[in-house]
Amino acid sequence: MTSVLQPEALEARIRDARLRPTRQRKLVLAALAAEPNDATAQGIHRRLHAEGHPVGLATVYRALAALSERGVVDALSHRPGETCYRLCSDEHHHHLVCSTCHRVVELPECELDPWVERMSARHGFLAEEHRLEISGVCSSCRN
Ligand SMILES: [Zn+2]
Ligand SMILES: [Zn+2]
Ligand SMILES: [Zn+2]
């Protein structure tokens, strides 16, 4: 699912997360919205420069960190030593990630809750949230 959102919708996502919609955050989020798959801070930085927005790399890192901390964007960890980011739907979902081409598929309709609750109860945990990232190779990369 691609999520090319209008500027107003992007700004609303930032406000809904109770973050200030600064110019930098809006630019970074718009750049991420234009990516069909995930992107690194460096990739976003390159895209912004190519589009004529000379935003510093540290600023891009900070904006992405703030946006992912508040759940506006998802952080994916399939690439060792580097965080990839993606603007997804705001419903609960998980990810299939191709480790070759970085294609990301959103998996809605999570069925993990009963299992999470059973496992948590067994260990005296009160589960609050869970994440799941399945990495592998997509069909186009296997051909
Ligand atoms: Zn996601
Ligand atoms: Zn692939
Ligand atoms: Zn889930």
Image: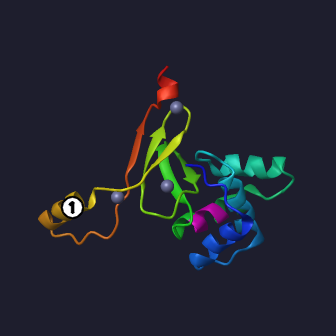
Depth check: give the residue in front, 98 or 83.
98
The residue carrying mark 1 is 114
The magenta stretch is: 63-67
Where is residue 88? Give x, y as percent: 54, 57
Based on the displayed image, in which of its 4 quarters is residue 131 positioned?
bottom left
Q: Is residue 81 left or right of residue 53?
A: left
- How crowded pointer 1 is (Cα within 10 Å; few <14, some 14-19, many 20+) is rated as few
Residue 27 within the segment the image draws in magenta: no
Q: Position of residue 117 (x, y in %)?
A: 20, 65
Q: Residue at x 51, y 43 (%)?
A: 104
Residue 132 seen from this side:
yes
Q: Which residue shows up at 42% across the image and 39% down it?
A: 135
Instruction: Determine the residue located farthest toward the left in the rendered image.
Output: 122
| Quadrant in which residue 8 is drawn | bottom right
Measuring from the top left, give residue 42's x and y in whole percent.
Answer: 68, 48
| Residue 136: percent from left, percent from top | 42, 34
